């Protein structure tokens, strides 16, 4: 794994914080150009907040690189990939938002971040269950997020106890 110099780490930290602000704002601004209320709401209130959570989560992960071995990092990658795959359409049956919110809440130590993601998971739950009547993708996302978080926890404990032979 590449070790970043303190100057590069500080630059990356600032860049990720900037992205956590800029990308959701740009997404919300893009919603203004979408025809129809549903599209505007989807981009501004459902999609944009997920970008905020993602960049803040990535920033937290990079602030503590020594705490993560290859196995836990592979689970991080799997969770992000599973979440991002949902944009391919209904062929992916789980909610990418729920996968990411559940996974990141359960694998991050920061209480403010966990509270943010809890609120965002509540919002995603409202959209999925009350607005779109989509309990299936919501439930599958919840279960997949729990599974990936549990697997990461096991891998992290193995690494911490010296059982990690990878």
Image: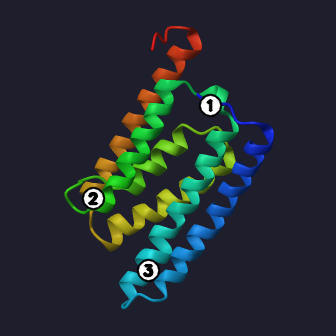
Which residue corresponds to the image point at 44% horizontal and 80% vertical from the top-left?
Answer: 41
Which of the labelled discs sits on residue 135, or is there none? 2
Secondary element at tag 2:
helix
Secondary element at tag 1:
loop
From the viewer's perspective, is 89 left or right of 52? left
Note whether 52 is above or below 30 in the view shown. above
Image location (x, y in percent) of residue 48: 51, 69
Quadrant of the frame with the N terminus: top right
- Furthest-left residue in this view: 91
Tell me how far mark 3 sits from mark 1, CA to CA: 40 Å
Instruction: Give the mark nearer the N terminus: 3 vs 2.
Output: 3
Tell me how far mark 2 sits from mark 1, CA to CA: 42 Å
Which residue corresponds to the image point at 49% horizontal and 81% vertical from the top-left?
Answer: 30
Q: Nearer the viewer, mark 2 or mark 1?
A: 1
Query: Mark 3 sits on what residue?
Result: 41
Mark 3 near mark 2, Cβ–Cβ under 8 Å? no
């Amino acid at each position: 794994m590449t070790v970043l110099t303190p100057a590069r780490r500080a630059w990356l930290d600032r860049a990720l914080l900037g992205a956590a602000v800029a990308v959701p704002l740009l997404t919300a601004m893009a919603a203004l150009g979408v025809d129809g209320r549903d599209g505007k709401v989807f981009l501004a209130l459902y999609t944009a907040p997920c970008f905020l959570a993602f960049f803040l989560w990535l920033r937290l992960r990079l602030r503590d690189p020594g705490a993560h071995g290859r196995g836990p990092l592979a689970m991080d990658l799997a969770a992000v990939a599973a979440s991002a795959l949902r944009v391919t359409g209904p062929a992916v049956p789980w909610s990418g938002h729920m996968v990411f919110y559940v996974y990141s809440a359960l694998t991050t130590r920061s209480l403010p971040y966990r509270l943010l993601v809890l609120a965002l998971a509540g919002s995603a739950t409202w959209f999925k269950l009350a607005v779109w009547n989509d309990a299936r993708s919501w439930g599958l996302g919840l279960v997949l997020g729990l599974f990936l978080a549990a697997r990461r926890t096991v891998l992290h404990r193995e690494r911490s106890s010296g059982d990690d032979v990878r």
